[in-house]
Amino acid sequence: MDFLDCPKFFYDIIREVRTTLNQVHESAPEEFAEMSGVISLDIHPAQALDVNLDGLPELKITLQQGFEALGAASWAQAAIAFQKLAARMPGDASVFNNYGLSLLQRALVMAKSPDLDVQNLATTQFESSILALREAAKTAPTEAIILMNLAHALLVSGRAEKAVGLVQMHDQLQGQTTVSGNLHAAALVSMGESSAAKALLQRLPQDEIVRANLDRLSY
């Protein structure tokens, strides 16, 4: 799904988006856990996908706006841009992935709000995110990033068992990765299976997030 015809600035924006999402997720999962009790382990950040606009050059400005909004953590604006793209590209998995990602990030922010009314509205955002990511998965059922993003959304919205099922599907198709194994472990912890989660994490390649989660489970 490489965007072969896009100008260089689109690739620069995509790199900025990935950096921003990493920064946002460094603290967001743990803070959300403290607030809701849904999870207690850090999760690798959800990921955006490149979008191919072959035959639709008139959408380049909207696509640029979407990626720029993601890079600026302007989740509502990103969602608006990718929703517009989805209306014109109803079968494009990358667009729906990015739309669902925008909604997921917005939901996480809303869920941490001190305003209870805003917290309650987060539920709707989580549902919308899951619907968009499911639409992406229907079109690209073997795309690892989409499967992990959907599992991520299911987990943080309180559906750990469904997240585990999706991670297992991912691992059957793609093989277990550090990202999928760590997300599986986070789901196990939320289900009260900390010992199984720790054993799983110990078998994974040790990146910073996995090591931090192992430390948390060792207390």
Image: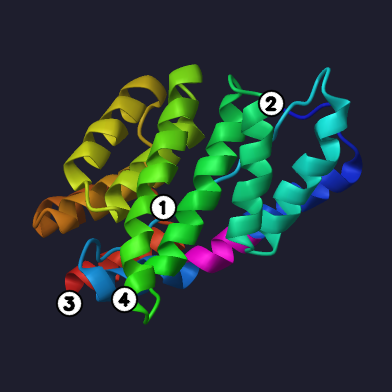
Residue position marked by numbered label 3 in the rendering: 219
The quarter of the picture where residue 120 lies is: bottom left
Which of the two labelled residues, at mark 1 and mark 4, occupies the earlier sequence position? Answer: 4
Element assignment for label 4: helix
- Image quarter in which the N terminus is found: top right
User: Label 2: how many residues lie within 10 Å, few (<14), some (14-19) or many (20+)?
Assistant: few
Q: What kind of residue is marked 1?
A: Gln
Q: Is residue 99 above or below residue 71?
A: above
Which of the two labelled residues, at mark 3 and mark 2, occupies the earlier sequence position? Answer: 2
Q: Going 59% across and 58% down the picture, which residue do you hit?
A: 75
User: Label 1: how many residues lie within 10 Å, few (<14), some (14-19) or many (20+)?
Assistant: many
Element assignment for label 3: loop
Q: Is residue 48 above or below residue 38?
A: above
Please tell me which residue lies in front, 126 or 162.
126
Element assignment for label 1: helix
Which of the two labelled residues, at mark 2 and mark 4, occupies the earlier sequence position? Answer: 2
Residue position marked by numbered label 1 in the rendering: 125
Q: Position of residue 105 (x, y in %)?
A: 49, 57
Element assignment for label 2: helix
User: Label 3: how many residues lie within 10 Å, few (<14), some (14-19) or many (20+)?
Assistant: few
Q: Is residue 201 visible?
A: no
Q: Image check: 161 left or right of 202? A: left
C-alpha gap between disc 4 and disc 3: 32 Å
Please tell me which residue lies in front, 134 or 180.
134
C-alpha gap between disc 2 and disc 1: 22 Å
Q: Position of residue 87 (x, y in %)?
A: 63, 29
Q: Image check: 71 left or right of 157? A: right
Residue position marked by numbered label 4 in the rendering: 116
Which of the two labelled residues, at mark 4 and mark 3, occupies the earlier sequence position? Answer: 4
- Image quarter in which the C terminus is found: bottom left
In front: label 3 or label 2: 2
